[in-house]
Image: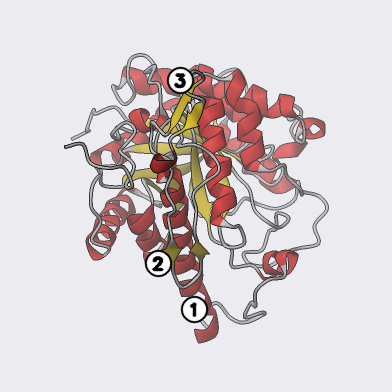
Amino acid sequence: MTDTRPLLIGVALEGAGWHPAAWREPTSRPTELFTAGYWTDVVRTAEDAGLDFASIEDSLALQSERFLVGDERTDEVRGRLDAVLIASRVAPVTSRIGLLPVATVTHTEPFHLSKAIATLDYVSEGRAGVQVKVSARADEAAHVGRRAHPGDVAIDDPSFAAFIEDAFDEAADAVEVVRRLWDSWEDDAEIRDVETDRFLDADKVHQVDFEGRFFSVRGPSITPRPPQGQPIVAALAHAAIPYRLAARSADVVFVTPADAVHARGIVEEVRRAEQGAEREGEPLRVIADLVVFLDDPAGESGVDRRARLDALGRALVSDARIVAGSASTVADVFDDLAAAGYAGVRLRPGVVTDDLPRIAADLVPELRRRGLLPAAAPDSSSLRSRLGLAEAPPSRYATPVA
């Protein structure tokens, strides 16, 4: 039986699209990929469609067809703008959609990330989050030059396995530091009283004094507590170790089920990870990723379009399920995911300039017709509330009210 509870719906934005040949489509705007106007347009399209959030991809190395190393290709998009800065540019010209830039925590100081996302939360008036990413690439480590990497070894080599364990443990510590820094100012720490000459109540600004294996951070933050208190933390996960990171540290986990049976198994694995991490409070919002190629009602089918793009250079290979077809075909997958207990779906447009408008024009109305989305886009004031999370949880350092 279909679960008709409304789902969350978001979009993952990656350059011209998730197909490596997306930039070659006549509708694409390859000369504008590094402009503010392009990003403003696509995020506004997502917002106008009623989508709940948009994530923006990023990394510390050039895109590559290979998993852990760079490549020499020149026929695909290479290079990108900083995702957090894109989100900060887009935030003032949008009003409702949540913004989730990707940030690599492996080579980034948590203090810097904390104030960047807190700033985004202010600029967006409470619509900020971050998708934390772990780096396992040697070229990314070489860009920063501050740590050793196991080098060119097999993925199943014990040294690489140990490196991955450490990287995810470090990511959990990084998120913990970020969250503590967000809490280091109490909500009413700023007095701003001209008559008494007091801008700040120093007793309500706290050192976090984090001491761990990877970080030693005193605090406090230099940015007051974000409007949401705790902006959203998300993670993409495919296996036990990243599921554990999400269970320890995140509010949202993006997963990649291949079919309906796999989808149910992933939910069970995520819940086991939560139990193993002794997670307290809200359960993870589990959101499935789908790559989509939607039919053009007046022209080419999504199946034919994907095949044509595959023939241009390199066929699309994805960690996420690829669905090509009509809005009804894609909505059927939403039905299955709702029945499997998913909180929502994040769509990866094969070609942003083609598929995002069709998501807006064709898919969203079909999902609303089926009761899988609300009849109208909620006008929630924060990303936390869109996800059904408690608004502005109290700072861990606040003195309890007697």
The circle on residue 50 is 3
Instruction: Identify which residue is drawn at 23% across, 41% down.
Output: 400
The circle on residue 241 is 2
User: Which sits earlier in the primary sequence, circle 1 or circle 3?
Assistant: 3
Which residue extends farthest front? 196
Instruction: Identify which residue is drawn at 60% across, 17% down.
Output: 298
Name the amino acid, label 3: Gly
Q: Position of residue 32 (x, y in %)?
A: 78, 30
Most foreground residue, 197 or 373: 197
The circle on residue 161 is 1
User: Which sits earlier in the primary sequence, circle 2 or circle 1?
Assistant: 1
Name the amino acid, label 2: Ile
Tell me the quadrant of the picture where the C terminus can be found: top left
Tell me the SS state at disc 3: loop
Total marks placed: 3
User: Which sits earlier in the primary sequence, circle 2 or circle 3?
Assistant: 3
Q: Position of residue 139 (x, y in %)?
A: 71, 67
Neighbour tally class for label 3: few under 14, some 14-19, many 20 plus, Cα within 10 Å: many
For residue 289, above or below residue 97: below
Spatial CA distance of label 2 from label 3 is 33 Å
Name the amino acid, label 1: Ala
Q: Is residue 158 left or right of residue 334?
A: right
Q: Is residue 265 left or right of residue 18?
A: left
Spatial CA distance of label 2 from label 1 is 10 Å
The circle on residue 341 is none
Instruction: Identify which residue is drawn at 72% across, 43% down.
Output: 21
Q: Is residue 271 left or right of residue 31?
A: left
Residue contact between numbered discs 2 and 3, judged by CB atoms under 8 Å: no
Q: Is residue 32 left or right of residue 125?
A: right
Residue contact between numbered discs 1 and 3, judged by CB atoms under 8 Å: no
Residue 227 image-quadrant placement: top left
Instruction: Identify which residue is drawn at 44% across, 44% down.
Output: 182
